[in-house]
Image (cartoon, rainbow, N blue to C red):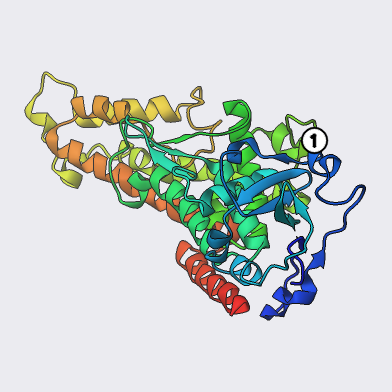
Amino acid sequence: MTAASTTIKRTRSASRSRFSESSFKRARNEGPMPGSAKFDDSYVVDPGFSNLKGDIYLKVGNTLFPASLEKLQNVEGLFADLFSIQQPEHADRIHGLPYCDMFNCSESELRVLMKLIHGSKFVFQRKAASGVTEFNIENILDALLVSSRLDLPGIRTQAKEAIHDFFRTMWSHIIYCEPPPEYPVVALTGYTMGKDNALRVLCFRMIKVFRECELGYCMPMAYYFAAQQTHNDILDGIKLPDGSLLELDHDDKKKVLKGREMLRSLRRNVTFMWLIEHAGYPKDYVLLHGCTSREFPKRKGCYDFIFDLYNLFFSPSSRLLEDRCDALESISFEAVETMKSHLCPECQVYFTDRIMYCLLASWGQIPRIFTGHTWDKLREKQIQIEANWRERLS
């Protein structure tokens, strides 16, 4: 690099030669000489970083992000290589500082990156006083994109672990075979549009970002969330606040729509298998799990209660299962507690365990529905992807 005003462009290759001096072009000046008031006035410092005393600007369009050169040099990957090069004394400057043009990233992506580099707290998540873990999915996706495009493995790892934390936290009761939580364990924060629209947009963005960033292990959950959206959203796309349309590509639409039907069947036949498998066996009910309700003849027996519950969910007039494809949702904490009050102690333990087991069985089918692989196989592939990704940087 022969000038402090540089242009970052990234193209994938098999070696670090793409980081060489010839890969970066000196930024052109258009208009008056650098340093003049008119030249400087065409640029604005991002408001979130206006109080930061940096010694170089990273620039996207006309927006400037002051940065500490020392901190940039400590970022593993491209930044460590680029910003360790000696800066020339007579380089173009804006507001008295050298600058570096940043391509392949947006203002929002660079803003998140700068927060991470300069040690801002709660960029991805934080634990609220209520016990809920708040996740900023927009920040996580932005960090995944910019770190993958600019070859910043340390930042990529942080973002990858954050999205894994989101999924693990959201479905921890399934993964670890625990009773359903009493209250939601995760919440979304930091979105730039209404909550309902944010939920719709984020699941479509996840599919696109995970594919570009080679996060195949996370793809089944992105497809699962997308499958919860309406047919119109899946087929026609979602209109964004700026008027543009966020659409899935043709293959993703087919995969999500097919997945919806498979999830509906999975919810009915696996998630609620605990209800189906016992409703038809009144003679064997006591023997199956030691029910003691017959010791109380004046009270409705456990089997009678389970059979009533079965009819509530599976009767021809019921739509409790037919219209839903959220196969990772069984009955709520409140419903479990109500059910327990109608069951003997032995049946309470038995059905609590069965509900958890059936949810875990459904969890195991999610990757098969959308990728044809198991979680273990996807994990193996992801480990190899990460190894190859780092090897390209060595």
In the image, 182: left or right of 47?
Answer: left
Front in this rendered view, residue 364 or 101: 101
Q: Which residue is mark 1?
A: 244
Q: Is residue 18 visible?
A: yes
* Spot occupied by residue 112 in the image (x, y as percentages of width and height): 58, 47
Q: Quadrant of the N terminus?
A: bottom right
Going 62% across and 72% down the picture, which residue do you hit?
81
In the image, 2: left or right of 345?
Answer: right
Position of residue 373 relative to residue 38, above or below, is below
Q: Most extreme residue toward the left, as rendered?
A: 295
Q: Circle 1: is it few (<14), some (14-19), or many (20+) Cα within 10 Å?
A: few
* Spot occupied by residue 2 in the image (x, y as percentages of width and height): 76, 71
* Spot occupied by residue 73 in the image (x, y as percentages of width and height): 56, 65
Please give the count of numbered marks on the rendered protein: 1
Going 31% across and 27% down the picture, which residue do you hit?
335
Q: Quadrant of the C terminus?
A: bottom right
The residue type indicated by label 1 comes to: Ser
Q: Is residue 227 visible?
A: no
